[in-house]
Image (cartoon, rainbow, N blue to C red):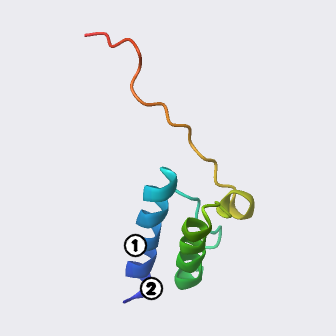
């Protein structure tokens, strides 16, 4: 599997687990395989390491409003 496909799957697993996307490393040419492995580690440990390392800001679950105006 190519690094791009591995990264895409890792990003999807991360999103499914945490319900938000992580920020990417600040460098344009970062090691995609290493970043994908880091995202997988976050999912396995149930802890987002990208918050401190890359400045990821977790979003809050807003859901549907209590009053829906039709």
Residue 69, given in percent of the width and then of the height, sits at 31, 10
| Image disc number at residue 3 | 2
Residue at the (39%, 26%) spot, across then down: 64
Element marked by disc 1: helix
**Percent x, y of residue 32:** 53, 80
Quarter that holds the N terminus: bottom left
Please give the name of the residue rendered at 41% of the width and 64% of the height, measured from the top-left corner: 12
Q: Residue at x 46, y 72 (%)?
A: 10
Label 1, label 2: how far apart the Cα atoms are: 10 Å
Vertical arrangement, residue 60 with respect to residue 35, above or below: above
Query: Residue placed farthest to the left in the image?
Result: 70
Q: Position of residue 70 (x, y in %)?
A: 25, 10
| Front-lying residue, 19 or 2 | 19
Label 2 residue SS: helix
Label 1 or label 2, whichever comes before in sequence order: 2
Query: Is 40 situated left or right of 64 in this image?
Result: right
Vertical relation: 19 (above or below) 22? above
How many badges with numbers are in the image?
A: 2
Around disc 2, counting alpha carbons within 10 Å, would you say few (fewer than 14), some (14 to 19), or many (20 or more)?
some
The picture quadrant where one finds residue 68 is top left
Vertical comparison of 3 with 70: above or below: below
Q: Are marks 1 and 2 in contact (CB under 8 Å)?
A: no
Picture quadrant where residue 4 is located: bottom left
The residue furthest bottom is 1
Judged left or right of residue 67, residue 43 is: right
Q: Which mark is residue 37?
A: none
Residue sticking out furthest to the right: 52
Image x and y of residue 40, in percent: 54, 73
Which mark lies nearer to you, 1 or 2? 1
Task: From the image, tell me which residue sits under label 1.
Answer: 9
Q: Residue furthest front?
A: 45
Picture residue at 65% right of the left edge, 67% below the top: 26
């Amino acid at each position: 599997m190519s690094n791009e496909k591995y990264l895409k799957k890792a990003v999807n697993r991360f999103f499914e687990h945490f319900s938000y996307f992580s920020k990417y490393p600040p460098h344009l040419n970062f090691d995609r395989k290493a970043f994908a492995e880091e995202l997988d580690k976050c999912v396995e440990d149930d802890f987002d390491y990208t918050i401190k390392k890359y400045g990821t800001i977790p979003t809050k679950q807003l859901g549907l409003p209590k009053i829906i105006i039709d």
